[in-house]
Image (cartoon, helix red, strand yellow):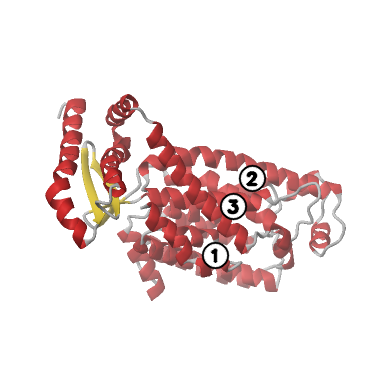
Amino acid sequence: MVKSLSSQVELNQDLILKADTPILDIASQFWEGERQNAARICYQSMRAIDDLIDNRKTEMLTFSPLEKQQFTTRVNAWVEGIDTTLPCNPKQQELLNVATRFKMPKWPWRQFSQSMIYDIHHEGFQTFTNFLSYAEGAAVAPGSIALHLCGVIKVAGQYLPPQFNIRKVARPLALFSYLVHIIRDFQKDQHDNLNYIAQDLMNRYTITPEMLKAIAEGQAIPLKFRELMNEYYRFADYYRCKARKVLNTIYVYLQPRYQLSLEIIYNLYHLVFERINISNGAFTSKEFTPSSREIKDRITQTISHFYSTIKKMGDKMTSRLKSFLMNAAFIFEPIASPFISYYLKRTLSDWEKKGKIDDYRVQTTRVKKFHYIVSVDLDVTSQQTRRVFHQSLWTLNRKVEEVRSWLKKTVGK
């Protein structure tokens, strides 16, 4: 697993080198192909509506009354096709097929459509609270889809919903990312007639729309603007801290590749966050955009840290602690799956070090309470096959029996 995931960084250099590649597109390269394709279909459907409205605002700041009606009707028809499972075109049928396959809830599309309709009928945000409500559709809803695809459980070729609240988990990470976007894209948004700075905060620091335009054009930056941006920086940092905490709570429910992809999302946004210089920055797009080398380095660091953390956890566990954690896992039954996998991986890791196998993958899926499916995938050469199946397979079978005995002893079944 370590080798197979790490090699994908090398396989996708072209994607990383593109300056405009969305961070989710980079992170989803570590997903299985079917989930990656599902994400592409979901986000294309949202992107089409979002771009339709943003492009119109770029051409002209306001919609005419007739345009508001036409665009609103179009968005409502789009979400109604999803709600009623009566698609209006082949693309939407493709989306519905994905939503059905992955057991996706419909609320993210409803929430997203509400934010798009807000965009049609409003220019900016009167209050920061208005912005947060808008962000539930513009950021939290798409983020929840990503969390859903990370968390679904595949059993016998079918997908089961995640075992955690996707909206609750997605919110802080999505808001951190969105606030970083707003600071990073300030100059570009102003050039495109888009303004995401709340009016109540602008009033607090006596900043006008004309001043924002002037700053984006390169004029001197007043202290009041830096104080305003510091508010957004503090908001972003608040949600960053919450995101870090909530991500740590769900990793027991995710396969390693999806844990890693979320770490990459968090760390690439953190890379941009680190570039924000409230006191002396020029607040230009160029200033906030990391180079392809910096992005590559951060991905490499994230992968290295991710796996070194897992290895250290394994190396430092005493047999007594491992026994305690295994028993605790079955007491707090929903988190037992990763401990079952860990127990089996101890033997497989030893096989790999001794050259008995080239690589291995273990996945434990919780089907229902005290019911698990354990999948073991071994990469072996023809020379290794005989040794594995005739000399070593009984050892792995014994490990599975030990887990089964442990389970019976712990839960009385």
Q: What residue is rendered at 31% in x and 40% in y?
A: 342
* Residue 298 can be seen in this image: yes
Please provide percent x and percent y for residue 202: 77, 49
Residue position for label 2 = 236
- Residue 36, label in figure: none
Q: What is the CA distance from the residue labelled 2 to the residue labelled 1?
A: 25 Å
Report the front residue among 109 and 341.
Answer: 341
Q: What residue is rendered at 45% in x and 66% in y?
A: 11
Image depth: mark 3 or mark 2 in front: 3
Which tag, 2 or 1, sits closer to the chain's start? 1
Q: What residue is rendered at 39% in x and 63% in y?
A: 38
Q: In this view, does 78 lie above or below 202?
A: below
- For disc 2, the neighbor class at 10 Å (few under 14, some 14 to 19, many from 20) is many
Q: What residue is rendered at 51% in x and 67% in y?
A: 13
Which tag, 3 or 1, sits closer to the chain's start? 1
Residue position for label 1 = 16
